[in-house]
C-alpha cells in the first residue's frame, strides 16, 4: 500500500448514476482508491442507479480488494438499497447507514 493515506476519503455522488454518469464515478473511485486505504462513497443524494452504476461499484470493490483498501457505501437511499439487494451485491459491498 505504498503512498496510501490512512485517512478515509469521501467521494460524494448525487442525482442519477447511469450510463452517462457512471464513467465519471468510476474514475473518481479509482483515483481515490489509488491513494487511500479507505474510501467512503456517500450516496445520500443519489436518486437513481442503473446497471452501469452497479458496474462502477463492482469495479471499485475489485480494485479495493487488489490494493488492500476498503470501499464503504454510506447513506444509500431506498432505491439504491433495493437494487443492491435485488442483485445480491449488498452481501459483497460494505453498506452502512
Image (cartoon, rainbow, N blue to C red):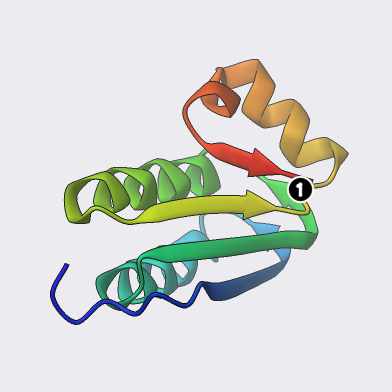
Image quarter of residue 47: bottom right
Quadrant where the N terminus is found in the figure: bottom left
Q: Residue at x 39, y 75 (%)?
A: 6
Q: Secondary structure at mark 1?
A: loop
Left or right of residue 75: residue 69: left
Question: x and y percent of residue 78 in the render?
Answer: 86, 38
Q: Is residue 76 above or below residue 34?
A: above
Q: Is residue 87 above or below residue 97?
A: above
Q: Residue at x 60, y 27 (%)?
A: 90
Q: Residue at x 55, y 51 (%)?
A: 72
Identify the residue at the far front of this view.
Answer: 6
Question: x and y percent of residue 50 in the render?
Answer: 61, 41
Question: x and y percent of residue 35 in the render?
Answer: 29, 78
The number of callouts visible is 1
Left or right of residue 5: residue 83: right
Question: Closest to the observer: 94 or 28?
Answer: 94
Q: Is residue 73 above or below residue 26?
A: above
Left or right of residue 45: residue 33: left
Q: Which residue is mark 1?
A: 76
Q: Residue at x 55, y 66 (%)?
A: 21
Question: Closest to the observer: 85 or 19?
Answer: 85
Using a 10 Å C-alpha cutoff, classify the residue at mark 1 as few (fewer than 14 neighbours), some (14 to 19) or many (20 or more). many
Q: Is residue 92 above or below residue 29?
A: above
Question: x and y percent of residue 86 in the render?
Answer: 66, 17
Identify the residue at the far left of this view.
Answer: 2
Question: Closest to the observer: 77 or 73?
Answer: 73
Amino acid at each position: 500500500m505504498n503512498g496510501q493515506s490512512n485517512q478515509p476519503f469521501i467521494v460524494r455522488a448525487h442525482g442519477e448514476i447511469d450510463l452517462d454518469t457512471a464513467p465519471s464515478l468510476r474514475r473518481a473511485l479509482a483515483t481515490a482508491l489509488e491513494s487511500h486505504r479507505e474510501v467512503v462513497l456517500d450516496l445520500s443524494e443519489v436518486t437513481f442507479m442503473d446497471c452501469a452504476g452497479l458496474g462502477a461499484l463492482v469495479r471499485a470493490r475489485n480494485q479495493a480488494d487488489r490494493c488492500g483498501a476498503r470501499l464503504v457505501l454510506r447513506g444509500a437511499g431506498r432505491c439504491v438499497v433495493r437494487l443492491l439487494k435485488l442483485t445480491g451485491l449488498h452481501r459483497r459491498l460494505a453498506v452502512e447507514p
